[in-house]
Image: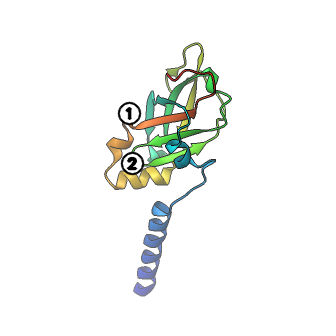
Amino acid sequence: MRRQLTFILILLLSLSIIILWWPINDSDCNSEAFLSSKTKKFQVQATKVVVQPWHGKHQVYGIFIVPNEYKQTPFFVLTVKGAGNHCSRPFGYSQNFDDVSAKPGTHLVRDFVRTRTALRLILQGLYFQLNDKQNWTLTFPQKAGQNNS
């Protein structure tokens, strides 16, 4: 009986380590190539950050106020210091979310960090870094004819 319990504990520990540290790349584009390219870019810092992975999926995110001209962008790159870069396609627009309201001519974008990535960072002692909105940036490709703000 003791041997089975030891085996089960080792198995659970191994699975936890694999789930938390296994790299995931389901990005919609090559974010590293885009960020290092000479393409003109538009960047915006997070207005609000929520870091509560213990509440389940989709509880680690940043809210960004973005000008309406970037609604039709093909992709954007979320950069979180310590968590790396992730490329996403825009989906859904909102004017109000989590007590944040967009001004006229803007909309809100909410983008997420994976729960397992957030848990890994928290276990590494980076909770306060993850929770700092200055460490969250959205980068958009700038369309021709637009001024860089």
Q: Which kind of residue does numbered mark 1 sit on?
A: Gln
Is residue 112 visible in this depiction of the protein?
no
Residue 98, relative to residue 101: is it above or below?
Answer: below
Residue 126 image point, x, y percent = 33, 48
From what the image shows, is residue 63 above or below residue 26? above
70 left or right of 124? right
Front residue (pair 25, 41):
41
Q: Is residue 36 above or below residue 72?
A: below
Whether residue 49 is visible, yes or no, is yes
Q: Residue furthest front?
A: 38
Residue beneath disc 2: 82
In this figure, which colouring scheme has been used for the structure?
rainbow
Q: Quadrant of residue 3?
A: bottom left
In the depicted view, which residue is nearer to us: 132 or 9?
132
Q: Is residue 110 left or right of residue 90?
A: left
Q: Residue at point 39% right, 38% down?
A: 135
Residue shown at 57%/56% (left/top)?
A: 25
Give the number of the disc on residue 36.
none
Where residue 37 appears, as percent x and y from the top left, is 53, 42
Residue 98's spot in the image, x, y percent?
51, 27
Q: Is residue 115 left or right of residue 68?
A: left
User: Which numbered tag is attached to residue 134?
Assistant: 1
